[in-house]
Amino acid sequence: GAGVSQSPSNKVTEKGKDVELRCDPISGHTALYWYRQSLGQGLEFLIYFQGNSAPDKSGLPSDRFSAERTGGSVSTLTIQRTQQEDSAVYLCASSERVGLAGRLSFGPGTRLLVL
Amino acid sequence: AQTVTQSQPEMSVQEAETVTLSCTYDTSENNYYLFWYKQPPSRQMILVIRQEAYKQQNATENRFSVNFQKAAKSFSLKISDSQLGDTAMYFCAFMSPGANSKLTFGKGITLSVRP
């Protein structure tokens, strides 16, 4: 079946602009995660959604970052007033349920470059 | 808070040889999960192998096996009969079981398999 998809694949923006990154999880997966991968760094947890529960936003680095998940499916990560340090690959992952022993299905990521 | 350390930034191995990637972690918990994820140039993270801390037997998946030393908090990945397709970044990750589980990743290691 179809895997996790993300769009756009690459995004170049100017400092100060807002960007929206989209994630389509695997159908039926109730848990959805966003991670950020900066150059030379591991993956940094940003936020996760599980069903209708309140999202865990503990990893969001600032209030310029927000995410929503509509209808328990598609998720959008929004970065307002982008800064150069926001340049990174943003990875989305989903799983059948939270804590299913870490068996996450990852998307190919969105590479964001802030000029 | 848990931490995952991958001290080797990169390694190289000859095709068909065996290579071991190191990982250490720090936690005060007794029950948890450990993972190795592979990220090829396509950027899509793939789960390679998973270990449950309460299991003493080391996990094995075809050419991939782990050496899990719980007391030493060490979790190394051994790749046997290396193939060109094994060229990728490899991330070690930790997860606590529970309702708000999320993966904590190391910084990764770049593995190059030479023909």
Image (cartoon, rainbow, N blue to C red):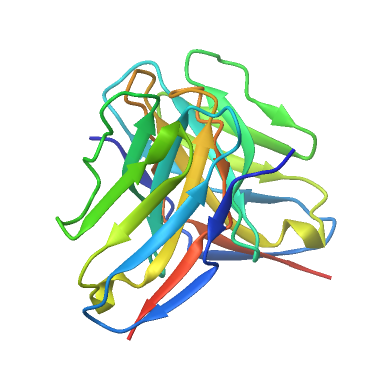
Q: Residue at x 62, y 17 (%)?
A: B57
Asked if residue B47 lies left or right of residue A102, the reply is right
Dividing the picture into quadrants, the one containing residue B51 is top right
Q: On screen, A86 above or below A44?
A: below
Dividing the picture into quadrants, the one containing residue A90 is bottom left
| Residue B70 place in picture, x, y as percent | 44, 24
Instruction: Determine if residue B74 is in view.
Output: yes
Q: Residue at x 54, y 29 (%)?
A: A29
Instruction: Determine if residue B105 is in view.
Output: no
Q: On screen, A53 above or below B67?
A: above
Q: On screen, B54 above or below B88?
A: above
Q: Quadrant of the N terminus of chain B?
A: top left
Q: Residue at x 60, y 64 (%)?
A: B11
Q: Residue furthest left?
A: A63
Relative depth, front residue between B106 and A71: A71
Relative depth, front residue between A73 and B73: A73
Q: Residue at x 46, y 40 (%)?
A: B93
| Residue A22 place in picture, x, y as percent | 46, 55
| Residue A62 place in picture, x, y as percent | 16, 57
Asked if residue A10 lies left or right of residue B44, the reply is left
| Residue A26 place in picture, x, y as percent | 60, 37
